[in-house]
Amino acid sequence: ARRYPPVLGDWRDQRGQLAWMTGWLSECRRLARPDGALLLFSDWRQVPLISDAVQAAGWVWRGQVVWDKTARARPVRGSYRHQAEFVLFATKGPWTPPTGGTFPGVFVHAPAGKNHLTAKPVRLARDLLGILAPGSDVLDPFMGGGSILKGAADAGHRVLGIELQEESFGAAGRLLGVPTGRQERGSHSARAVPRAVSGMGVPYEYAIKSKN
């Protein structure tokens, strides 16, 4: 079986998770443009908690869409296949769709080419971000293997990804074609930033961003 880096912070109980999520979602809202949008993945168990955190942080929850993973998703003996994840959609304030039209409520993409435990298909990321105006700024504060950044960059958006796991940072750099040493190449840069508070025994946070 393939080994992925461990998920940091997976020890929190539900109340701890709610408090933690509300904190960083509030900071994301502060940084977002007035017309900013939020897309947040969840499995079926966490939708109630995550929707509470989104609203407690001040975002306007506007609904959710379904990611259908197809029959390649994990089977459950004697029960229903865990074939779907949900993507909660929220906005900082009033929402005027910049691209017009109507977008699907269900996106069908089989999991493929995972380089991280929670990696999403690059095509799924690109399709979801079609709701944004061309050339938007896309932040992924937990970039993992970088699939959301790759989908956003492929769609012509500027990206900024943050990650605590050095191994995942390296995987994201490889996916985006960015060396994760000191050198820079192409349209993106990568760097390690010392953390002011070394939480969870992690001395650095790692970032990949568009150069322009």
Image (cartoon, rainbow, N blue to C red):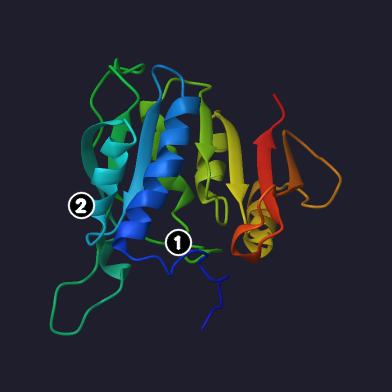
Task: Report the amino acid beneath label 1.
Answer: Thr
Identify the residue position indicated by label 1 in the image.
118
Q: Which mark is residue 48?
A: 2
Quadrant hosting residue 169 = bottom right
Could you say which is closer to the camera, residue 30 or residue 125? 30
Q: Looking at the image, can residue 106 be seen?
A: no
Is disc 1 placed on a helix, strand or loop?
loop
Task: Report the amino acid beneath label 2.
Answer: Pro
Q: Looking at the image, can residue 194 be seen?
A: yes
CA neighbours of label 2 inside 10 A, class few (<14), some (14 to 19), many (20+): few
Relative image position of residue 81 (x, y in whole percent): 20, 71
Relative image position of residue 14 (x, y in whole percent): 30, 61
Relative image position of residue 117 (x, y in whole percent): 48, 66
Q: Pick the quarter of the image with the C terminus.
A: top right
4 lies left or right of 204: left
The residue that appears at 55% across and 72% down in the rendered structure is: 4
Looking at the image, residue 123 lies above or below residue 80: above
Could you say which is closer to the camera, residue 73 or residue 33? 33
The residue that appears at 67% across and 44% down in the rendered structure is: 207
Could you say which is closer to the camera, residue 181 or residue 197? 197
Frontmost of labels 1 and 2 is 2
Could you say which is closer to the camera, residue 6 or residue 194? 194
